Amino acid sequence: MITFDRLNRRAHLYLGLILVPWVLMYGFSSFIISHHAWFRSETEPPWKPLFDREYRHPVPEKGDLRVVVNEILEENNLEGAFNAERPNPAELHITRNSFFNQTRLTYLIHEQKLRVERQEWRWDQVVVRMHFRGGYHQPLFLNLLWAIMVDVVCVAILLWIASGLIMWWRLSQTRVWGAVAISAGALSFALLIWRL
């Protein structure tokens, strides 16, 4: 007979196993972010030019910049996740993101020139890019799938925590030490938030 406790333990076990690659990725990338000096060389990977050519594409003063940038990326066979900014009326800066490299495009609107450069691969940057990747505003199905998976992982972590709390509470011999552990975690967290 399947009891609630047995079902809860199985849920906790299998959720933990499913979450292994995601928790490892977020844990390891957080460690790299906190200790970035340990992982970075004295010089950043160079940006290698892919092309620098004349290019024309209308960029309206107002409107949705993402639509225009998506068209520019498509016209240059660089579709995918990106960030964009227009620091002044004459320039458009686009960063085309992937896990394994970054490509930056500088479009000089008035001069009608497009410069495209790519940064060399580096393993620590790959892991950190995974940490910050998310959101539903990027083109292409795989970007959408990654965003969905991040949401699924968030829900799975909450369920994993809930199943752990239920197990702790239902095992009376662990309640005291469990309460100590929860209190220590909550107090340290609250203290840091209050003082920082």
Image (spheres, grey):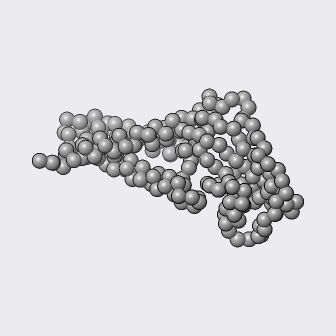
**Does any portion of residue 74 appear in the rendered image?**
yes
Quarter residue 63 falls in: bottom right
Residue 95 percent coordinates (x, y): 69, 51
> Could you tell me which residue is drawn at 71 percent across and 35 percent down?
45
Side of 6 relative to 128 (left or right):
left
Q: Is residue 24 above or below residue 84?
A: above
Image quarter (top left, top right, bottom left or bottom right) of the C terminus: top right
Residue 125 percent coordinates (x, y): 61, 39
Given residues 124 and 144, the one toward you in this image is 144
Residue 41 percent coordinates (x, y): 69, 29
Q: How many marks?
A: 0
> Could you tell me which residue is drawn at 64 percent across and 35 percent down?
122
Side of 95 relative to 164 (left or right):
right
Side of 154 relative to 51 (left or right):
left
Given residues 49 and 31, the one toward you in this image is 49
> Could you tell me which residue is drawn at 18 percent across and 49 percent down?
4
Quarter residue 87 falls in: bottom right
**Does any portion of residue 147 appear in the rendered image?**
no
Residue 84 percent coordinates (x, y): 69, 57
> Could you tell me which residue is drawn at 73 percent across and 32 percent down?
43
Given residues 164 and 123, the one toward you in this image is 123
Q: Is residue 59 above or below residue 84?
A: below
